Image (cartoon, rainbow, N blue to C red):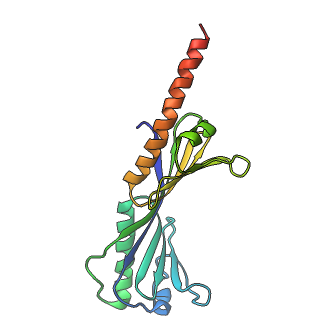
Amino acid sequence: MNVRVDIVNVVATTHLQRELDLELLSIMLRDMGAVTYDRRRFPGLIVKLDDGVSYLIFRTGKIVVVGCRNEGHVNQAIRALVKQVAKVVGNLPSTLTVQIQNIVATADLGYEVDLETLSEKLEHSVYVPDEFPGLIYRSGVGKPSALVFSSGRIVVAGATSVDAVMAVVEEIRRLTEARKSSAESGESGDED
C-alpha cells in the first residue's frame, strides 16, 4: 500500500485495582499538568498535559488515557501517571492490563475519489451528498468506520489496532484504485 496513514489519537484504559481518593490526587498531581476535579459536574479527575495527553481518573481506579499517538506512547503515558499516583497512594500493581479502546487515523489516497461509484461498490456505506460531503463506511460490528471524501482523504475511527486501520484503508484504496486505473486508461484511449 502506497498510502500515507497518520495515527492522530489513541484512547486506552487500564485499572489500578484499588479505590482512589480523587480529592487528594487533585492536589498531589498538579505538578503533572492542568488538573480539574468537580464531582458535581463529572465523576472523574481530569489531568491535561502540555503534550496533548489527558487522563480521566475515576474513584474506582479506572484510568482512561487520550491523546497518544501510538501504543508505545500509551504505555509511556500510563507508566508516568502510575509513578505519580503511587507516590500518593502507595504500592500499585506492578503490571497493568492496558486495552486500546479506539484509534483515530487519517489517510490520503493522493487522488480524487468518485464517492457515488464507491458507495455502489462498498457494502455498509452511506453517501448522501445533500446531508454530508463524505461517504460513511461502517466496516462491520466491532470494526472501524471510515469517512471518505472526494479529495481522497480518509478518517478512520473505532479501530482497536493499527492493523484494523490499515485493513480499512487498504480496502478503500483497492476499490478506488481499480476505478482510478480504468478511468486513466479510458482517458489515454480518447487521445488517439
Q: Quadrant of residue 189?
A: top right
Residue lying farthest to the left in this orientation: 94
Q: Is residue 124 above or below residue 11?
A: above
Can residue 76 be seen at all in this image of the molecule? Answer: no
Q: On the rendered structure, is 179 left or right of 101?
A: right
Instruction: Give the residue at the far right of this rendering.
Output: 130
The residue shown at (53%, 35%) is 110
**Position of 80 compared to 176: left or right?**
left
Look at the image and tell me in which quarter the N terminus lies.
Answer: top left
Q: Is residue 190 above or below residue 119?
A: above
Q: Residue at x 38, y 89 (%)?
A: 88
Q: Position of residue 48 (x, y in %)?
A: 52, 73
> Residue 183, how many percent across, how many down?
56, 24
Of residue 64 and residue 130, the one placed in the foreground of this image is: 130
From the viewer's perspective, is residue 69 above or below residue 135?
Answer: below
Q: Quadrant of the C terminus?
A: top right
Q: Position of residue 28 (x, y in %)?
A: 45, 87
- Asked if one can make out residue 42 in the rendered structure from this viewpoint, the answer is yes
Quarter-of-image position of residue 149: top right
Figure label count? 0
Residue 106: percent from left, percent from top = 51, 49
